[in-house]
Amino acid sequence: MMIKEKKVKKKDKSVNNIQILFLVSCFMFLKLVSCKSEFADNSDRFKEGVFEIPAGDNFVKETIIRKDTIQISKYGKNIDTLSIKWKNNFFYTLKYINPKNELQKDPMYIQINKLYDHKYDFTVRIGFSKFSQKGTVYKIE
């Protein structure tokens, strides 16, 4: 009789452990599902507006105006018009509409690396070369 009683108690403990595990799993699932994501992807705010790349780190001060598929870049006394094509909110391609030299004939591939409230860090690669450069674009309007 003792042996049966031990087996029944062992089975009851096992059932209790499974019930507790099930309840904990349900609680964790509900907690996970009910939490809001704190990351809001509003990176499309950089697709249009007025921007600036400050002078320094191999860049001259540049003012950029973006609207639709056009980007106008002003640096020094120079003004260039480029077409802009967004692949997604974090990658776009720029191409000079009227290239002035061989280098400007190649597209520029820009990868947005990190977003902030009114700026983003980027890496630019020209054409299919291995040359790349990093910088920061500030949204001013």
Image (tube, grey):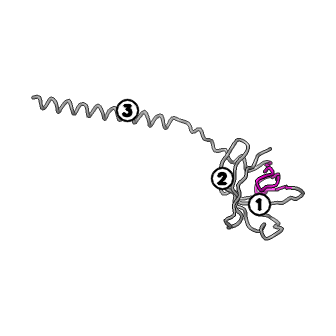
> What residue does disc 3 label?
23
Residue 9, above or below 114: above
Toward the viewer: 68 or 113? Answer: 113
Q: Please indicate whether residue 29 sits to the left or right of residue 115 in the image.
A: left
Q: Which residues are magenta?
A: 50-75
Where does residue 59 sit, x and y in percent of width and height? Answer: 79, 55
Q: Residue at x 11, y 28 (%)?
A: 2
- Point out the frontmost of discs 2 and 1: 2
Majority secondary structure in the magenta region: strand
Locate the C terminus and report the quarter of the image it occupies: top right
Measure the alpha-carbon separation of dots 3 and 1.
57 Å
Locate the N terminus and report the quarter of the image it occupies: top left
On residue 26, which mark appears? none
Q: Residue at x 30, y 33 (%)?
A: 17
> What residue does disc 1 label?
83
Toward the viewer: 130 or 80? Answer: 130
